[in-house]
Structures are given as structure tokens and as C-alpha cells.
Amino acid sequence: MGQLAAFIILSVVTLVSAVVVVASQNIVRSALSLIPTLLGIAGVYILLQAEYVAGIQVLIYAGAITVLILFVIMLTEHGTGARFRQVNEQVLPGTIAVAVLAALLMAVFFGTAWPRAAGTLPQYTATSIGTTFLTSAILVFIVTSFVLLVALMGAIVIARRER
Amino acid sequence: MLLVDWLYVGVFLVVGLAMAALPLAVVWALAPRLAQPQKRTTYESGVVPFGQAWAQFNVRYYLFSLVFVIFDVEVIYLYPWSIVFRQYGRYAFFVMLIFVGILLLGLIHAWRKGALEWT
Amino acid sequence: MTLGLTHFLVLSTLLFCLGLFAMLTRRNAVAILMGVELMLNAANINLVAFNKYVAPGALNGQVFALVVITLAACEAGVGLALVMSAYRNLETVHVDEINVMKW
């Protein structure tokens, strides 16, 4: 019961601020509203017994990626961008498409017989994650470092001024 | 999860909010207020501010924050690795050596391209 | 009524659709990237929820969620670098004005 209440509060926080992200005409406001969205999702992770993922969500998403987005807004949009029209002419078809997709997915989700009860996860998730990274997910571990390397090099090359 | 655990979270939440709100409340209650136009200006280390607060930053700031984000992501992998390091010993050490070595190439590239220089 | 898998799936569906709406209707490239971040977060909620309800025991869903967070950070870095490159060369970040390749 308490979990359901916590879930409802977290969903309301997440969805309301996500609507502000999507709908605000002030781009700085919508970037700042991304932070409560991501923190609400971190709370949902804690409800799902994924404490380590929740911590990483706060650290990487709410801490680092949002700062990066704000930097780029300050660098490109002359401040708030409130002077520009922020939406294109696809609002009506976009709304219809998104509503149809949501209805379709909901119909599938409510029509499927999912397992009712939550399973039990290992007690210390971070330890199990470390074990997984070193045993069965070792290839993912190494390939990820390549991806990070390529992203860093590519972004520096793209962002720097050409001579 | 036990109810006591959630109680801890609640206590932390209340104490954290109080630590942020209490100094503001004390200042609001005690400090004398004198309306002067200089007090409304933006604080810029004592220099008289010029231009808008929404000024454009240099591209260089973006490169710094980019390098920060990429090496911040490294923490995702370093922390679980450090927990199970003792179980796996030398194997874990060499795996992480490869991981950090590959990312070190990125740092060297950033350095060579001048992304770490301020001027 | 206890907390079930369907609750999380509904939350992630709504979040995904909001992100998709931002992608379809926004003109600013940075706002489109924020929509992509919302969609990736919706996918992450699904991964972690399925890990808890459908495939407990192992933590593959959470590990995959961590990899997705890593890739989201890379995507944000490279995507925003592209936005800045477009701004420098074309002096706009609005994707319907970036039409040099359009004939």
C-alpha cells in the first residue's frame, strides 16, 4: 500500500515535469524541468529495488547530461529562445500519432497476462552487477570503453572550430 | 522493504529540507532590510555588471563539460568493479587495465587537440 | 491493489509517448535531444521493471539499463556537438531551417 502511494507520487512528479519539458516555450525552463523528471525516475528505480541504477541516474543524468544540455542552450539559442517559434506545423498529426501509439501499447499491456508477484533480486545489487560485468557481460564491458573513446574523439573533432 | 527503512528515508528527507530551509528562515526573520537600488544588481565579484545575464558562453566550456561527462560515465563501471575486485584478483585487474587504457587514449586525444587548454 | 508490472509499463508508455511527441513537434535540435532522453529513460524503466517481475535472480536488465545510460551520455555528447557545429556553420539550431542538402 505504501509502495503504491510512493509510486503514484513519483509518477505524478515525473509526468508533470515531463509535460513541461515537452510543452514549454522557454527552452531553458524545459531543460531545467528535465531534472525533476530524471529524479522521479530514480525514485521509481528505488521502488524496483535497483538502488545502484538509481544512484547512477542521479549522478550521470541529473548531474552531468542536464548540465551539458544547458551549456549548449546557452551557447546556441541567445538565452531563453523565447523569441523563436518552438514547435513546427506537425502538432496535430504528432498528437494523433502519439495518442494512437499510446492506446495500442496500453491495449497490449493490459491484455497480456504478466507474472503477478515481484520476484526476489539478489540482496546487494551493486555486487551482483560487478560480478555480471566481469563474467557474462565482459564483452559489453570492453566494447563500452571503445564506444566512450569514439564518442569522446568524435565529439571533440565535431565541436572544435575548423581551421 | 521494511517500514523502518522507509522511515530512515523520510527522516533524511525532512532533515535535508530543514537544513536548506532553516538558514533562509533565520535570515528572513532576523536580518534588517534596507531598500537600495545597488542591492538589486547582480553580484559579479564586486565588479559593476555589464550586459545581460543570458550572455553566450565560449565553445571551450562545452569541450570541458564533454570531457567531464565521458569520464563521469566511467564511474558506472569502476564502482561495481571495485566491490568485486577481491574475488577475482588478477583477472579483474587486467580487465580494468584494458578498460582504463582504452579511455586513456581518449584523454590523450583530447589533450593533443587542445581541449584541455584554457586560453 | 498492490504494485504490479502493469503500473510501471503504463508509466513508461506515457513517458515514451511524451518523448516521441517532443521529437515530432519541436523545432529546436536541443529539445529533440531532450525528447530522445525521455524515450531512453522510458526504455530503462521497462528494462528494470521486467528484471524485477519477469526475470528475477539475475541482474541482466539492470546491467543493460546501465549500458543504456552510458550510451545516452555518449549520444548527448555527440548530438550536442553536432548541434553546435550546425549553429556555427549555419547560424541556426532549428531543424527545419537546416536544409542545405535539400534540393
Image (spheres, helix red, strand yellow):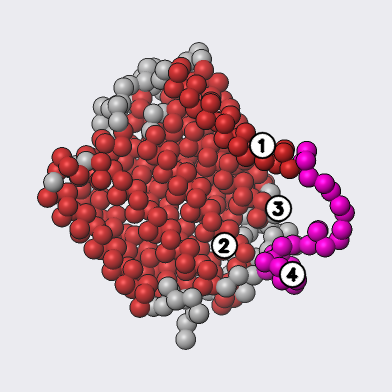
Q: Which of labels 3 and 4 is toward the front?
A: 4
Q: Position of residue B30 (x, y in %)?
A: 78, 41
Residues at marks 2 and 1, CA–CA distance in whole angstroms? 31 Å
Element under disc 2: helix
Residues at badges 3 and 1 in contact (C-beta under 8 Å)? no
Residue at (35% x, 78% y) in the render: B112
Earlier sequence position, callout 3 versus callout 2: 3
Amino acid type assigned to the residue bearing label 2 in the image? Phe
Amino acid type assigned to the residue bearing label 4 in the image? Pro
Q: Which disc number belongs to residue B86?
A: none
The chain under label 4 reads B
Q: Position of residue C43 (x, y in %)?
A: 43, 40
Residue at (49% x, 75% y) in the render: B118
The quadrant in which the N terminus of chain B is found is top left
Q: Which residue in the structure is indicated by mark 1?
A: B22
Q: Is residue C11 above or below residue B38?
A: above
Q: Position of residue A37 (x, y in %)?
A: 56, 41
The chain under label 2 reads A
Q: Main secondary structure of the magenta part?
A: loop
Q: Is residue B16 above or below residue A1?
A: below
Q: Residues within 10 Å of mark 3 (few under 14, many from 20)?
A: some
Residue positioned most to the bottom? A163
Residues at marks 3 and 2, CA–CA distance in whole angstroms? 18 Å
Question: Considering depth in this image, is B8 or B107 the residue closer to the camera?
Answer: B8
Element under disc 4: loop
Is residue A102 something that shows in the picture?
Answer: no
Residue positioned most to the top? C1
Q: Residues within 10 Å of mark 1 (few under 14, many from 20)?
A: few
Question: Considering depth in this image, is A66 or B10 the residue closer to the camera?
Answer: B10
